[in-house]
Image (cartoon, rainbow, N blue to C red):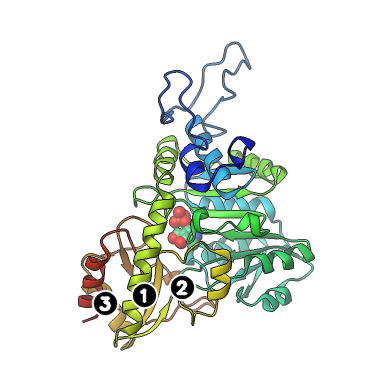
C-alpha cells in the first residue's frame, strides 16, 4: 500500500485507493483503457510507462493499487480469474520435488488445480485439517515450500487461526498463502496476521454483483510481488480493462455490502438453528462452532456464507435447493442476490471420492442483501 493511503480507514481506501481523477479530463472515475498498445515518443519513449496491456494497463493498475491498499500489502496483481491467480502463484513458487500442505476443506477448483495439474509437474501435497495447528505442523516436511489456508472455508465454513499457522510457516521457513475470498479484506486482514500472500476470487464479494470473473494476489513483500508480476506477464492470464473497472466499481461498496451480508446471515442462522428439518448449521458466528473464538478474534463479523445439513439426506437437500425461489439456484457466491446450491453435486463435484468430499445432505447459501424477511420466507417454504 502506498503511504498516501496507509493512514486512511478501510471504507475510504476502498473508494479512493487507485481511483485518482483522470489526468487528461478530470473524470472522477478511472476510464476503461480498452487498449492493447501505446504510442511511443521515439523508440522506448513511453509516456506513462505503458507499452502493452498484457504487461500493464492503467485500469488494471488502478485496481491493483486498490487491492494492495485494501489488504495492507505491498503489491496487488489482478488476473482473469481466481484460478488464474492461483496458477500463477503456484508456478512461481514451486518446482518439481517441492511439497505443499493444503486444507481438507477448500474450494473444489483449488483442490483440482493441485491434484490434476500441479501434481503432474512433480509437486506433491499433504491434506491437513488446517483448523488443527499441530496437524499442520506435522504435515510440513523438509521439501515443503508453502502452506495453503482457506478461512472461512468453502463449503464447510471451517476456521483456521491465521496467526498461529503463520507462526508454523515462519518456523519452518515456508510461505503462508491465505485464500481470503469468503471474508474479503473488510472482514479479515491475513497479511497483518503474518500471511505472505493473499489470494482472491474477485468474482465473489469484491466484484459483488455476479457480473464478472476475476482473481487477485496481494503480497506482503515487494520482492515477491515483483517476481509474481514478472510471471503474470510471462504467463499472460491478466484481468482485462473492463473486468478491472467493474471490480473497482464493486469494491467501492464492499464495506456496506459486507455489513448487510453478515447481518442478514445472522438472522437466517437464527431461523435455521430452530428449524426441525435442519440437522446442523455451519456458521462461524454460532458460539458452538469450533472456530467461533478464533473467527471472533480475526474477523470483523462472520460474513454472508452459511452451510446447513438437511434431514433426509442427499435427495432432501437437493429438493430444498430446487424449491427455493428468491434464493437463485446457482454456483458462485458473494453477489448482492442470494444464491443456494448443493455443493456435493455442484461446486464440489470435483472433490468426490477425495479427502475433501463434502456431506451429501449439505446445502450452501450465499446470503445476499435483499430484505431479510423475504429471504426467511423463501427458505421456510423451501424447507417445507
Ligand atoms: C474460495 C474460492 N477460491 C477460489 C475460487 C476460484 O475463483 P474463480 O472462480 O474466480 O476462478 C473460488 C470460486 O468459487 C472460491 O470460492
Q: What is the C-alpha distance between the residues marked 2 and 3?
A: 23 Å
Which is more toward the observer, 348 or 222?
222
Q: At 34% across and 71% down in the image, what residue appears?
A: 267
- Is label 1's Cβ within 8 Å of ligand 1? no
Which dot, 2 or 3, sits closer to the camera? 2
Q: Position of residue 140 (x, y in %)?
A: 73, 71
Q: Position of residue 343 (x, y in %)?
A: 39, 72
Q: Position of residue 260 (x, y in %)?
A: 36, 59
Describe the element under mark 2 as helix, strand or loop: loop
Q: At 20% across and 67% down in the image, what residue appears?
A: 325
Q: What is the C-alpha distance between the residues marked 3 and 1?
A: 16 Å
Which dot, 3 or 1, sits closer to the camera? 1
Residue 366 can be seen, yes or no: no
Q: Position of residue 83 (x, y in %)?
A: 51, 55
Describe the element under mark 1 as helix, strand or loop: helix
Residue 356 can be seen, yes or no: yes
- Is label 3's Cβ within 8 Å of ligand 1? no
| Circle number at residue 285 | 2
Q: At 45% across and 48% down in the image, what residue appears?
A: 214
- The residue that disc 1 covers is 269
Residue with the most extreme top position: 42
In this rendering, the answer to whether 7 lies above or below 312 is above
In this rendering, the answer to whether 312 lies above or below 236 is below
| Left or right: residue 116 compared with residue 374 | right
Q: Are marks 1 and 2 in contact (CB under 8 Å)?
A: yes
Which is more toward the observer, 65 or 85?
65
In this rendering, the answer to whether 352 lies above or below 166 is below
- The residue that disc 3 covers is 320
Q: In what quadrant of the picture does the C terminus appear?
A: bottom left
Amino acid at each position: 500500500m502506498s503511504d498516501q493511503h496507509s493512514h486512511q480507514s478501510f471504507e475510504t481506501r476502498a473508494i479512493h485507493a487507485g481511483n485518482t481523477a483522470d489526468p487528461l479530463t478530470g473524470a472522477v472515475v478511472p476510464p476503461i483503457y480498452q487498449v492493447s498498445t501505446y504510442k511511443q515518443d521515439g523508440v522506448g519513449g513511453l509516456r506513462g510507462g505503458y507499452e502493452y496491456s498484457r504487461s500493464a494497463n492503467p485500469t488494471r493498475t488502478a485496481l491493483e493499487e486498490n487491492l494492495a491498499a485494501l489488504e495492507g500489502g505491498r503489491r496487488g496483481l489482478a488476473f482473469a480469474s481466481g484460478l488464474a491467480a492461483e496458477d500463477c502463484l503456484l508456478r512461481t513458487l514451486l518446482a518439481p520435488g517441492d511439497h505443499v500442505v493444503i486444507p481438507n476443506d477448500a474450494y473444489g477448483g483449488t483442490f483440482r488445480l493441485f491434484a490434476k495439474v500441479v501434481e503432474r509437474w512433480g509437486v506433491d501435497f499433504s491434506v491437513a485439517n488446517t483448523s488443527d495447528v499441530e496437524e499442520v505442523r506435522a504435515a510440513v516436511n523438509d521439501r515443503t515450500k508453502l502452506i495453503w489456508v482457506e478461512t472461512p472455508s468453502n463449503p464447510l465454513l471451517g476456521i483456521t487461526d491465521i496467526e498461529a499457522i503463520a507462526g508454523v510457516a515462519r518456523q519452518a521457513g515456508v510461505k503462508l498463502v491465505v485464500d481470503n475470498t469468503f471474508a474479503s479484506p473488510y472482514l479479515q486482514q491475513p497479511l497483518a496476521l503474518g500471511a505472505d500472500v493473499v489470494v482472491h476470487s474477485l468474482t465473489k464479494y469484491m466484484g459483488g454483483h455476479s457480473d464478472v470473473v476475476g482473481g487477485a494476489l496481494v503480497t506482503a513483500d515487494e520482492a515477491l510481488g515483483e517476481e509474481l508480476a514478472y510471471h503474470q506477464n510471462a504467463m499472460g492470464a491478466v484481468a482485462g480493462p473492463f473486468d478491472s473497472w467493474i471490480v473497482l466499481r464493486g469494491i467501492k461498496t464492499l464495506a456496506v455490502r459486507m455489513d448487510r451480508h453478515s447481518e442478514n446471515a445472522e438472522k437466517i442462522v437464527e431461523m435455521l438453528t430452530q428449524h426441525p428439518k435442519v440437522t446442523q448449521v455451519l456458521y462461524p458466528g454460532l458460539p458452538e462452532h469450533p472456530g467461533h473464538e478464533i473467527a471472533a478474534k480475526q474477523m470483523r463479523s462472520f460474513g454472508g456464507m452459511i452451510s446447513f445439513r438437511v434431514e433426509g439426506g442427499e435427495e432432501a437437500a437437493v429438493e430444498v435447493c430446487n424449491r427455493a425461489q428468491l434464493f437463485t439456484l446457482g454456483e458462485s457466491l458473494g453477489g448482492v442476490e442470494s444464491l443456494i446450491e448443493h455443493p456435493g453435486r455442484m461446486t464440489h463435484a470435483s472433490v468426490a471420492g477425495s479427502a475433501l468430499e463434502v456431506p451429501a445432505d449439505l446445502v450452501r447459501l450465499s446470503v445476499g442483501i435483499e430484505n431479510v424477511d423475504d429471504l426467511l420466507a423463501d427458505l421456510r417454504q423451501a424447507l417445507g
